[in-house]
Image: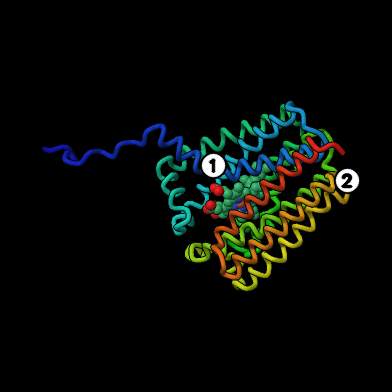
Amino acid sequence: MIGRGAGVAAAKPPAATEICRALYRLAKPRIVAAIALSGATALTVAAQRPPHFSKLLPCLLALLCTGAASAMINCVVEADRDLKMGRLAQRNEALAVAGPRLILGVAAALLTAGVAIAAGFLGPAPTLLLCGGVFGYTVCYTLFLKPQTPWAAVLGGLPGAFPVLVGGSASGNPPGLGVLILFLILMLWQPPHFWLLALSHRNDYHAALLPVLPIARSIDATRRAILTWVALLTGATLLLPATGYASACYGTMALVAGASFWGCCYWSLLGKGPLRFAFRCSVMYLLILFAAIIVDICFIPR
Ligand code: HEM
Ligand SMILES: CC(C)=CCC/C(C)=C/CC/C(C)=C/COP(=O)(O)OP(=O)(O)O
């Protein structure tokens, strides 16, 4: 008797490098790196000087570990929905290569490491805030908000902005006004950041039955919301110099960056440019803002 499938080579298990590459993709590395940077920026705003590495390093590590773990859990929970989204094809392949059990095992290890680092080096408040952000994203946002309401990008902004509170409290004091202003900036930045993507990929979200704003309301309503929120965001970035947490030099840069981002959104929303470009501008805008705050506080004498 010929062995089952003797003529067909048994499916070769993925190589270790393939699995590592898949896990890296599922960790949403660039998003998580930006989230860790938001925590480091908050630590700098709270300290009003270059943060000491004994706080900066554990803050970055804790946010990178728990952010990656949160992203991996999100990918496993949303696996069925993500299969309907063309934008996520490579992520779906990565999920098939690594398998949900291994992904959740690695996420559990990263989560444990991140919380242990925060508890050991940052203290109880940052650790609690870290756990709150993970819970807010993996449970509240992923399981409930995202599939049920077009305002998920606003309410889901809370866990997305929690890393700012983690970083701000890592300095040892309760988050002060400067950290709360940075929290407000993140809360105002995230919705237009996502709505630009939702406009650009609305067919994907329709196929996945996700009630994003362009589908639950209208494209025009989303366009107006984006331009309104970016204008409010630009105003919020000026609160830092207005309250003495950054210099007028940063304020000028923030005004120019905000006006440029608004112009980029307006240009793309008029149909003169690709929406994906405006989405990329939202990411560049945030990274420039963080860099300007850090340079202003650490290197520009006041
Ligand atoms: C409500 C909260 C948020 C939502 C719904 C959201 C949504 C998304 C989505 C869907 C993508 C993937 C776009 C793609 O397929 O390439 C993305 C990309 C990105 N997000 Fe967000 N995001 C949120 C919060 C944040 C936060 C808090 C940060 C950082 C502080 C951030 C930074 C980024 C970056 C850097 C990218 C680009 C990743 C890449 O190029 O691969 N996002 N965002
Ligand atoms: C303190 C701490 C670590 C908090 C967690 C912060 C965190 C990981 C926020 C993620 C925000 C985000 C990328 C949402 C997009 O998810 P999505 O499901 O809408 O994106 P997708 O469509 O690409 O899956």
* The residue at label 1 has a CB less than 8 Å from ligand 2: no
Q: Which residue is mark 2?
A: 244
Which residue sits furthest left? 1
Please count the marks in the image: 2
Quarter where residue 18 is shown = top left
Percent coordinates x, y for residue 10 in the rendering: 25, 38
Q: Which mark is residue 27?
A: 1
Element type where label 2 sits in the image: loop
Percent coordinates x, y for residue 104 in the rendering: 51, 40
Quarter where residue 6 is shown = top left
Q: Is residue 180 above or below residue 155?
A: above
Quarter where residue 275 is shown = bottom right
Label 2 is placed on what type of residue? Gly
Q: Residue at 52% across / 62% down in the picture? A: 201
Residue 113, visible in the rendered structure: yes
Q: Quadrant of the C terminus?
A: top right
Q: Residue at 64% across / 61% down in the picture? A: 264
Residue 138, visible in the rendered structure: no
As measured in the structure, the alpha-carbon distance from the residue carrying label 2 to the one carrying label 1 is 37 Å
Q: Residues within 10 Å of mark 1 (few under 14, many from 20)?
A: many
Of the numbered discs 2 and 1, the one sitting upstream in the chain is: 1
Q: Quadrant of the N terminus?
A: top left
Element type where label 1 sits in the image: loop
Q: Residues within 10 Å of mark 2 (few under 14, many from 20)?
A: few
Q: Residue at 83% across / 44% down in the picture? A: 246
Q: Tell me whether the residue at label 2 lies in contact with that at label 1, contact meaning CB atoms closer than 8 angstroms.
A: no
Label 1 is placed on what type of residue? Ala
Percent coordinates x, y for residue 288 in the rendering: 68, 47
Q: Nearer the viewer, residue 46 or 217?
A: 46
